[in-house]
Image (cartoon, rainbow, N blue to C red):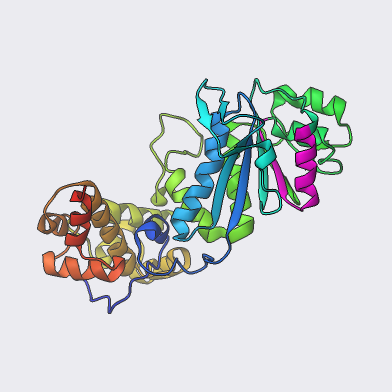
Amino acid sequence: MADKPLQNQRKFDSRLRHSNQPHLPGQPAEGIPTTIHRRIGFLLLEHFSMMAFTGAVDAIVTANLVSGKPLYSFETYSLEGSTVRSDLAINISVDGDLRSIPVKTLDVLIVCGGYRSKLEPARPTVEKLREAARHRVMLGGLWNGSYLLAHAGLLDGYACTVHPDSRAGLEEVCPQVKLLAQPFVIDRDRISSAGANSALSMMLAVIRNHHGEEVVRGVEEILSCDRTLDDLPDLPMTALADDPTLPAALSTVLQLMKNNIEEPLSIDDLAQHAQVSRRQIDRMFQRYMNTTPARYYLETRITRARRLLQQTNEPITSIAIACGFSGAPHFSRCYREFFGVSPSQVGARRRRP
């Protein structure tokens, strides 16, 4: 199947733009905002859940990577001292203590608790949280962090969630809080997650509210590659072809494209293997992939080439052939049109100390 010149088009049309976005030049992908920057503070309690904390942070750091712009920044704080001990017995250095939390300039303040974290906040903690609320800072809790917010009276009339082990105490002490048995809850300017796994999901929901679906899809493309539909460890990692919302014929074509990169099949051959007409394939790609079959096939191959360039020391000619291009000059031209740099420049960056 012959490739046509891209005529200086650098934009990925299909969902492959999500995984390629951090490597593209110029402006972020269409639909991703560039000017909004939010500042998030994490108040780490002693024995806080490291997994819950890193899940939340991973979401916002990856959102920055996907957007190509700093959508978020974050700082960490302790109740006192320069370090906090996590539930893994690892001491984490923080940016400041409770007194230094800049509530006037924060957009979000999240209390990170853990299975062994103390749930009786001292008066300075309560006062700092109430000060943040007065400045209309979004408040949140990870694991049992929302227990402290409730104790400060900042969840009265709000819905929230908490780790099951802390549920009974919260129901008894703060009956005015609407406690839900859900992995995470977002109620206006209050957010909460019940455990380690749901912290990532909660932050993705926050990012979706702030910046839309496009950013979240990009984050999920990077962070959710090992999540299966049934969450079973022995199932293969899901790919776009496994998306249950896609028609079976389209999934077949996507899998064929993925399996035939070095010697690309013609669109007619793909239609024959999938037992559909060429016209049906065109319609499915326009509806579900927002592009043509030929364009998507090229994007699949150029994405594969980008990964090989960044992760191996193979010669450019070998990579070009392995990805179905007729030769190194044609491949180099296509690569530059997508990524703004030549394949040789990518190799030079890899070798640079």
- Name the foreground residue: 96 vs 269: 96
State which quarter of the image contains the N terminus. bottom left
Give the residue drawn at x 22%, y 55%.
349
Residue 52: name its quadrant: top right
Which percent across, then down, holds residue 35? Answer: 55, 66
Residue 76 relative to residue 161: left or right: left
Q: Is residue 290 visible?
A: yes
The answer to whether residue 173 is left or right of residue 285 is right
Q: Residue at x 67, y 23 (%)?
A: 117
Q: Give the range drawn in magenta.
A: 124-143
Is 62 covered by the magenta stretch? no
Q: In this view, does 153 lie to the left or right of 230?
A: right
Using the image, determine if residue 22 lies above or below residue 330.
above
Residue 183 visible at all:
no
Residue 295 screen position, x and y as percent: 32, 69
Residue at 44% over, 60% down: 68
Q: Is residue 350 above or below residue 144?
A: below
Residue 3, x across and y down, in percent: 21, 71
**Measuring 74% from the left and 50% from the top, which residue is drawn there?**
189
Position of 13 with respect to 175 (left or right) is left
Image coordinates for residue 154, horizontal then vertical, percent: 82, 41
